[in-house]
Amino acid sequence: DLVNKGGFCNIFKGKNLETDEIVCIKQQNKETIKKETAMKEIDIIKNISEKINYSCKFKDCFETKDYIYTILSYYDDNLNNFFKKNKKNFHPNLIKKIFKELNLVFKELLDNRIVHRNIMPSNILIKYSNEEKTNFDSILTDYGIAKEYDKDGKISGCLGNFNYMAPEIIYEKNKFYKNNCDLFSIGVTMYYLFFGKLPFNRQYIGVTQKQLNIIIDEDKQFEDLLIKLLKENPDERITWKEYFNHPFFK
């Protein structure tokens, strides 16, 4: 069954005929993606999933004349669908739980000098941990545009979802940017899950901090973290070390 159709791949729900396990099948057309690029993504998934439970799990891969197929574990849903179906904004405690789990993946990516560049609710999968589907673990997926950066933490290339992309990627297309671009995407994702809308109107040029008015009476530490994550200037944005050690996660 076709689950999702993207610009660079198709996602199918399938079944292992030997074990009856339900799996996710990612199909990539060789006409639209280089084999080297697809294999780099597979290497990242294999490496991360072997170490961290909160990353999508690699099963197998193979290719045909026209396509490259990656077999992954199948998960129940993603945060974007879950959010829309429940029609209820997330409490800071739930957002804290989600990102404390994902932070283990982010740390592993940093240890391997990899930037994800596509962090957003639809790329955070849900693995339910009870039959009532009230509790779940969060799983990071889609490493298709992840990239290794140099020793100075610099990356180039304008890739990602426009609504969740850091400003320096959008406006500095032909220049290098730093690995803290993922922190901005984390901030946008957190903001969306709490407020139920995106923090910036990007239908026009001019994303500025003046558009933001973040007030969170339920959790002032969460308010402080969001403000620091959503700094337009990457030099003013919170660092990865400060992010992991922020009081919100304590």
Image: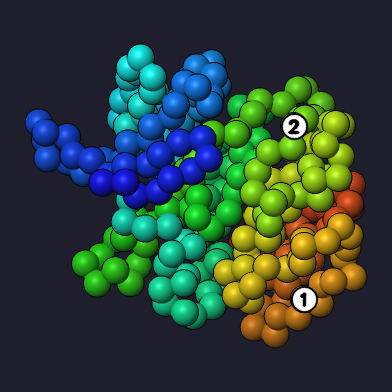
> Is 141 situated left or right of 117 in this image?
left
Labels 2 & 1 near each other (Cβ < 8 A): no
Question: Who is closer to the viewer here, 148 or 52?
Answer: 148
* Position of 29 relative to 235 (above/below): above
Q: Residue at x 60, y 34 (%)?
A: 145
Could you tell me if residue 49 is visible in this image?
Answer: yes
Percent across and percent down for residue 189 are 62, 60
| Mark 1 closeness class: few <14, some 14–19, many ≥20 residues within 10 Å | some
Residue at 49 percent across and 43 percent down: it is: 6
Left or right, residue 247 beside residue 210: left
Residue 130: name its quadrant. bottom left
Report crowding for label 2: few under 14, some 14 to 19, many 20 or more residues within 10 A (C-alpha): some
Per the model, the C-alpha gap separating discs 2 and 1 is 30 Å
- Residue 92 location (% of width, % of height): 58, 73
Asked whether, in this view, residue 218 is left or right of residue 33, the answer is right
Q: Secondary structure at mark 1?
A: loop
Dot 2: what SS? loop
Residue 103 image point, x, y percent: 57, 49
The residue that label 1 is drawn on is: 214
The amino acid at mark 2 is Gly
- Of the numbered discs in the image, which one, if any, rests on residue 157? 2
Q: Is residue 47 visible?
A: no
Q: Is residue 146 above or below residue 167?
A: above
For the residue pair 152 and 172, the one nearer the viewer reads as 172
Residue 191: which quarter of the image?
bottom right
Type of the residue with mark 1:
Ile
Please provide percent x and percent y for residue 41: 51, 27
Q: Residue at x 37, y 41 (%)?
A: 11
Residue at left offset 31%, top offset 25%: 60
